[in-house]
Amino acid sequence: MNWMQRWLIAATVILCVLGCSRKENGEQGVSPEAQRAKKEAAEAMEAAKDLVSEKKEDFVNTMQANLDQLEQKMQDLKAKAEAKGNEAATEFEKRKPDFDKKLTQAREELSKARKAAGDAWQGVKDAAQTAYEELEKTYNEIAEEYK
């Protein structure tokens, strides 16, 4: 259960406790405290949604920049391999498909992260992060050969 779910449960309990009071004629009504608590809960929920949205946007933008940077580094690495001669260039070309496959996977996970909402966001975010880490590991392994 994430913090937002816990907060929603707490807000619901508070609203239930404060929510109902008896009017003089015996009808159920909402107390001013409950109305105020309801308004504050709605404002807090809106603020929480905005915060999550901002964090999501920051993550997606950072991840996109990281993927673009790794792709550029791989292009630079190709030039280094080619400068070292045919054997190094051939070896590089043998290793590059693994990088390309992981780059595609990372971009797919990032695409899912862009679209994810609610409870699905954390799982999709984690998958995107893991895909990036695997891609970075593959790049580092290849780059080690051309230092």
Image (cartoon, rainbow, N blue to C red):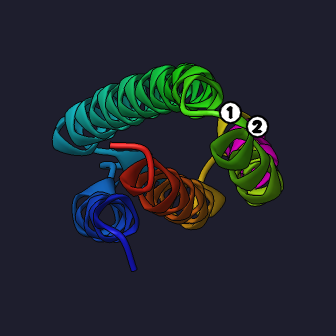
Is the residue marked by circle 2 packed among few (<14), some (14-19), or many (20+) residues within 10 Å?
some
Quadrant of the frame with the C terminus: top left
Are the two marked residues, 1 and 2, in contact with CB atoms closer than 8 angstroms?
yes
Quarter holding residue 116: top right
Where is residue 30? Give x, y as percent: 37, 44
- Whether residue 125 is situated above or below residue 58 in the rendered picture: below
Residue 111's mark? 2
Is the residue marked by circle 1 packed among few (<14), some (14-19), or many (20+) residues within 10 Å?
some
- Whether residue 49 is situated above or below residue 135 in the rendered picture: above
Which SS type dominates the magenta stretch? helix
Q: Residue at x 62, y 59 (%)?
A: 124
Q: Residue at x 43, y 44 (%)?
A: 146
Question: Identity of the amino acid at label 1?
Answer: Arg
Residue 24's mark? none
Residue 110 included in the magenta stretch of the image: yes
The one of 9 and 60 positioned closer to us in this rendering: 60
Q: Residue at x 56, y 55 (%)?
A: 135
Region of the chain picked out in magenta, as a range: 104-112
Quadrant of the frame with the N terminus: bottom left
22 sits to left or right of 116: left
Question: Identity of the amino acid at label 2?
Answer: Ser
